[in-house]
Image (cartoon, helix red, strand yellow):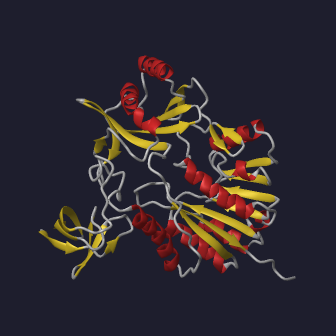
Amino acid sequence: MNGRLVISRLGAQGDGVADTPEGPVFVPYALPGETVTVARERNRAVLLSVVQPSDLRAVPPCRHFTECGGCALQHLCPSAYLAWKRERVVDALAARRIEAPVGETVACEPASRRRAVFSARRGDRGVILGYNRALSHDIVDIAECPILVPAIVAALPLLRHLAGIVAATRDSFHLTVTQTDSGLDVAAEGSGTPSEAARRAAADLVVREGLARLSVDGEIIVEPVRPAVTFGPASVVPPPGAFLQAVASAEEAMARLVSGHLGKAKRIADLFSGSGTFALRLAARSEVHAIETDAAALSALDRGFRFASGLRQVSTERRDLFRRPLTLKELNLYDGIIFDPPRAGAEDQAKQIARSDVPRVAAVSCNPVTLARDLAVLVDGGYRIVSVTPVDQFLWSPHVEAVALLEKPKRRR
C-alpha cells in the first residue's frame, strides 16, 4: 500500500519511524521531520521519495548506500549522527532507571576500520565479494567502502581473486580481512576444503602480493610474515580470524579511559581478555590476571607478554566465565577489574562483582542494552557510576560501544 508518512524519530536500528494510528511504521533511510512517500507492508515500508527533506539530511559518500546492508545512516549529518548514538546509550540506561553522566560520543573517522568481514560466493559470472543486502542473504558486490582503511579497499580485486581460488563450494562464505602492522591477514571461513592445487595457487598469490597470512577454517595455509598488532608496549600475533577492535583509534580511546580509571590498581583482573587488548596496556603499571575461554587468544596474549619489555607480571587462565564466573572470594584478590564480554553481556559475572569489595571496575560493551542490565546489577550492589562514554567504531551503523567506569566506597568495619 502506497502513501505518505511523516517521520517523527529514529528507531534503534537507524530506521525512520512514523507514528500512525495503527502503530509505528519503520522506514529505512528516512529522517525525523521528513514527509516521505512509501510502499508500506504492515509495520515496515520502502522509501519511494522524500517530499520534504530534513535539514539534517546529508549526501551519502558511498555509491552502494541503500543497496548494501552494511551502513544505515550515511544520509544523516555528523553532529546529529553522534548525538543519536549517545541517545542510544542514554535510553538504554534510562530503561533500567540508571542515572549516570554520559559523555559525548567519541567519533570514528571514515577510512579507519582495519577489520572487515566480507561475504563471498562463486557464481556463474565469477566471484562476488561484499556485504549482504539489508534483511537478505543476497551479496552486494562492492567496488568501494568508505569506512575501511585504504589498504583493504585497494586490495578488493586481489581479495576477490583469492576468494575464488580458495572457494571449494558454491555456497556463500566469509572472508575476514584485518590490517596488521605487517600486512593484511586474511581468514576464510566456510569456503570448503581447498584442493592441493588451490592451496599452492593461493599460497603463491599471497607471497607474490605481500599479504601477511592466509588461513582457511582456522588452518594456516601460508604465513610469509607474522601478522602482528600492537597493544601498548606489546606486539601480538592474534589467531586466524580472531576478534580485534575494529578501529585502532577507538581501541586507543577505550584503553585510555580504562587505564586512567584503573591506573592506581596494583592487581587487576581482565575478564574476557581476548588476545590482550587491555591486559597488555594495563601491565605497564599493574599486575594483570587475564581470563578468557579461547585458548589460542590466551596463547597469543602470553607470547606478546613474554616478548615485551617493561611490563609487570601477566598471568593467564582459560575459563568459561559464562558457566563459571569469578566468585566473590576470587574477585576480592584484586583492586581493579575490567570486563569486556560479547554482546550478550555478563550478568552472572556482574552479580559476583556486585557482591565484592573491588574498589574500581571498568565495563566495556558493544551492546548498550546488556551493558545497562549489568550496570544495574552493579549499582544495586553498591557501585557508583563515575562516567559512561559512548564510542563509535562501527561508522554509520546502529552499533555503539560504551565504556562505563565505576567505584565502590570502602565498607566501614
- Residue sitting farthest toward the left: 2
Residue at x 72%, y 37% (from the top left corner): 303
Q: Position of residue 47 (x, y in %)?
A: 20, 62
Quarter of the image for the N terminus: give it: bottom left
Q: Tell me how many marks there are.
A: 0
Q: Quadrant of residue 60?
A: bottom left
Query: Is 344 in front, or is 126?
Result: 126
The quarter in which the C terminus is drawn is bottom right
In screen coordinates, is 318 left or right of 100? Answer: right
Looking at the image, the residue that sits furthest to the front is: 55
Is 13 on the left-hand or right-hand side of 184? left
Decide if residue 19 is in sight here. Answer: yes
Q: Is residue 344 visible to the viewer in this orientation of the structure?
A: no
Point out the residue furthest to the right here. 413
Reply above or below: 333 against 234.
below
x and y percent of residue 186 in the render? 49, 33
Relative to 261, residue 378 above or below:
below
Query: What residue is drawn where x is 82% and y is 48%?
Result: 312
- Comparing 154 with 354, the one in front is 154
**In the displayed structure image, the side of residue 171 where residue 223 appears, left or right:** right
Q: Position of residue 216 (x, y in %)?
A: 48, 31
395 or 44, which lies in front? 395
Q: In x, y percent, where is residue 267?
A: 80, 58
Q: Is residue 203 left or right of residue 164?
A: right
